């Protein structure tokens, strides 16, 4: 069996393998540089928002950027505080290998144009890109405020698609650090990129930790239900943007229209504004935000196991006292799991399955890092940072 280029041996579940992972969470680097000082707590503010559903053609990077910049200029006429663009909208999922489409803000003339627009229009722009990093390609949502990049979120829950290599993010891009919220002049903004919105309890993980949830998408569906359903769970309003246009379906299949939408909704899930399904447009409106979110020093552990209904839990080895209750989770139908609010410490991460009769297998301890380790239960890839 192989995964992400690794050759994976099979190891019997009957033998317990002990590999300790150090979970030392110092927290991500959060900055209000360029975004102004954080707003006062518990004081409501209103912000004008524009969510852009740009019509793109996968692989036509230059044309897609030019069209997106035109729509940013159009949206700016309404003087929004925040403009949202979709996930990886310039390249899209246009090939079995996306590395040639990786960019950086230092070298890409088009990305520099978005930075300039943010400064020109005195606004925040959140946009999806395929960012080239020293450790490979990452699917990133960048936060640009008044001409400066104040945050980057790298997608951590990657879409699995064995049937379509051009959509299998486990092979195409590297995994990010998990749930992240960023300090801005509009409060703490939590970002969920596409499939991250679909992970069980993803929105609950932001409860009390974010004041607004922003969701760039590049999916083959109308994603609005994830935001309208999730923002009530998190207790905050939400914005989403999905591309429209034509998406790639392999070398021999014709491209297909993407039925995406963009919009914004209140904390209750009530939609304030939404574009038509599959039609390019700009959804605009005003959101009321009450900054209350607090930082914490806990982390999420996200990952994927080879089988559904695998129980993932933690056993504490060392850490700050007193010893807390530790989270556990069961993988979903795609084998993904999320362990939330894990405090600093050293842990064994344990995977356990059950047979058809419900009898549990002997627990197997796996290494809590981003490397791939395989057992009879299947392969498990972990990201255990803040």
Image (tube, rainbow, N blue to C red):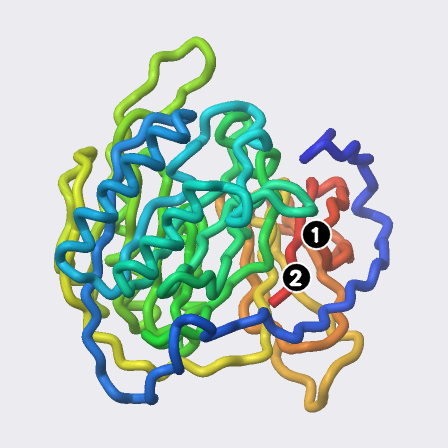
Question: Can residue 226 be seen at all in this image of the molecule?
Answer: no
Which residue is at a point 71% across and 59% down the rendered structure image?
350
Q: Residue 117 location, x and y as percent?
A: 32, 53
Q: CA distance from mark 2 to mark 1?
A: 7 Å
Q: As displayed, is residue 103 above or below residue 368?
A: above
Which residue is at a point 50% across and 57% down the rendered structure image?
153
Q: Nearer the viewer, residue 232 or 365?
A: 232
Which residue is at a point 76% across and 55% down the rendered structure image?
366
Q: Residue 143 location, x and y as percent?
A: 42, 60
Give the mark count: 2
Query: Can you identify the residue that label 1 sits on?
Result: 370
Q: Residue 190 location, x and y as percent?
A: 41, 65
When asked about the image quadrant of residue 29, the answer is bottom right
Which residue is at a point 18% across and 51% down the rendered structure image?
75
Where residue 384 is drawn, which disc sits there? 2
Tell which circle, 2 or 1, labels the residue nearer the N-terminal end: 1
Question: Can residue 214 be seen at all in this image of the molecule?
Answer: yes
Q: Nearer the viewer, residue 179 or 311?
A: 179
Left or right, residue 137 beside residue 245? right
The kind of secondary structure element at disc 2 is loop
Q: As displayed, is residue 238 above or below residue 89?
A: below
Q: As displayed, is residue 138 above or below residue 63?
A: below
């Amino acid at each position: 069996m192989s995964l992400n280029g690794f050759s994976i041996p099979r190891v019997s579940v009957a033998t317990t393998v002990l590999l300790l992972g150090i979970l030392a969470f110092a927290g991500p680097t959060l900055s209000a540089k360029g975004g102004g000082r954080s707003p006062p707590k518990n004081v409501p503010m209103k912000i004008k928002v524009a969510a852009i559903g740009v019509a793109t053609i996968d692989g036509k990077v230059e044309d897609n950027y030019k069209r997106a910049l035109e729509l940013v200029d159009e949206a700016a006429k309404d003087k929004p505080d925040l403009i949202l663009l979709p996930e990886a909208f310039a390249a899209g999922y246009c090939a079995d290998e996306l590395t040639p489409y990786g960019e950086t803000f230092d070298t890409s003339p088009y990305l520099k144009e978005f930075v300039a627009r943010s400064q020109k229009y005195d606004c925040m722009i959140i946009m999806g890109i395929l960012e080239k990093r020293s450790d490979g390609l990452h699917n990133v949502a960048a936060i640009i405020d008044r001409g400066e990049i104040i945050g980057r979120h790298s997608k951590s829950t990657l879409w699995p698609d064995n049937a379509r290599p051009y959509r299998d993010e486990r092979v195409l891009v590297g995994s990010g650090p998990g749930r992240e919220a960023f300090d801005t002049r509009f409060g703490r903004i939590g970002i969920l990129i596409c499939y991250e919105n679909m992970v069980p309890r993803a929105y609950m993980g932001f409860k009390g930790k974010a004041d607004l949830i922003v969701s760039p998408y590049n999916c083959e569906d109308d994603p609005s239900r994830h935001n309208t359903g999730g923002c009530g769970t998190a207790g905050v309003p939400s914005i989403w943007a999905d591309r429209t246009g034509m998406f790639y379906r392999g070398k021999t299949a014709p491209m297909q229209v993407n039925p995406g939408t963009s919009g914004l909704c209140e904390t209750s899930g009530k939609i304030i504004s939404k574009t038509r399904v599959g039609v390019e447009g700009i959804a605009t409106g005003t959101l009321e935000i009450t900054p209350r979110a607090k930082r914490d020093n806990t982390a999420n552990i996200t990952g994927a196991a080879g089988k559904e209904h695998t129980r993932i839990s933690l056993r504490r080895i060392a850490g700050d006292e007193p010893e807390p209750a530790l989270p556990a989770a069961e993988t979903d139908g795609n084998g993904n799991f999320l362990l939330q609010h894990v405090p600093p410490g050293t842990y064994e991460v344990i995977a356990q399955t059950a047979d058809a009769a419900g009898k549990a297998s002997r627990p197997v301890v796996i290494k809590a890092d981003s490397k791939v380790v395989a057992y009879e239960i299947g392969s498990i890839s972990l990201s255990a940072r803040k």
